[in-house]
Image: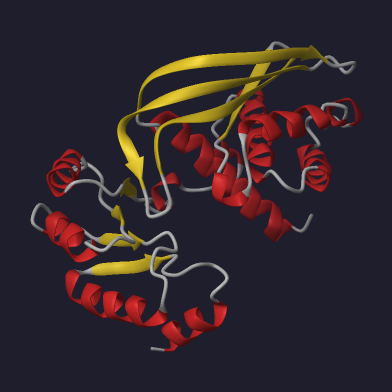
Amino acid sequence: MKRKDFLEVSGKSLLGLTLLSQIPAKTFAKSTKTNIQSAGGFMIEVKTKRLFLENTWTISRNSSDYKDNVLVKIEKDGVFGLGEAAPNVRYGEDNLKTIERINSVRHLFDEHDLWHFVDLKEDIFANITDQNCARCALDIAILDWVGKKLNAPLYKIWGLDKEKTPLTSYSIGIDTIENIKRKTREAEKYPLLKIKVGKDNDEEIIEAVRSVTDKPIRVDANEGWKSKEVALEKIKWLQEMGIEFIEQPMPAHMLEETRWLRDR
């Protein structure tokens, strides 16, 4: 693995560790787990958690009231590392496949010294090719173990300045206009907002947010605009509303249309 690739993957893992504590759920339920002791002295525990969301989460593609995530715990020498996978149906991921893929690479922990985590992760990534969230869960768990063994946060291990960490955004899903206003007010402490659009009333949604706050807004259509003409019309209107950028304006397969849109 090249140094650039390692830093990119590790940076994503650091972000994942930061976000684990920010899941907006009101309760946890439906937990199942497997506990297996490896020949190399590792205890690897995999379990599912159903997270019931505070609000129904709606984007242009679907809605959900809960998320089934997969938690991984790697324990060795009395120290454990935790990781989490959030399967995304858009990319063919689910919790059952994620658990299968994690279980399929348990033997790699017997073949590697956990301190040689770059080589270990390289082998894990080579063996898990269709469930990136499973890669993520193991990646985070390994690095969490390393940080705890060294008694230092990862940003210090990597020599990073946490004050230079890029800001991420707080997402607000599609909802009634009154609920969107309420959610915007409740998100006052977050400096950046990502607003989900991709429906017929996109303008009304953005106007509702702007009636509450003037902070920077990012927009995510989740492939909801089905033609380049509609997308262009939406974007021109959004230019006047202080939008930082627009994510996934059209379906992923519409490459030529997206290129046409970008040129304009």
Query: Which residue is located at x 84 percent, y 14 percent?
Result: 41
Q: Nearer the viewer, residue 160 or 8?
A: 8
Q: Nearer the viewer, residue 100 or 102?
A: 100
Q: Position of residue 184 (x, y in %)?
A: 18, 46
Q: Is residue 215 above or below residue 76?
A: below
Q: Is residue 172 above or below residue 230?
A: above
Task: State the quadrant of the N terminus.
Answer: bottom right
Answer with the quarter of the image where residue 157 lies.
top right
Q: Tell me if 216 is positioned left or right of 15 in this view.
A: left
Q: Nearer the viewer, residue 31 or 83?
A: 31
Task: State the quadrant of the C terminus.
Answer: bottom left
Answer with the quarter of the image where residue 53 lies.
top left
Q: Is residue 106 above or below residue 186?
A: above
Q: Position of residue 95 (x, y in %)?
A: 62, 31
Q: Tell me if 218 is positioned left or right of 9 in this view.
A: left
* Residue 90 appears in the figure: yes
Q: Is residue 32 above or below residue 161?
A: above
Query: Which residue is located at x 75 percent, y 30 percent?
Result: 100
Q: Position of residue 3 (x, y in %)?
A: 72, 57
Query: Which residue is located at x 70 percent, y 57 percent?
Result: 5
Colour logic: secondary structure
Q: Tell me if 186 is positioned left or right of 131 in this view.
A: left
* Residue 159 appears in the figure: no
Q: How many marks?
A: 0
Q: Position of residue 232 (x, y in %)?
A: 33, 81
Query: Which residue is located at x 21 percent, y 61 percent?
Result: 201
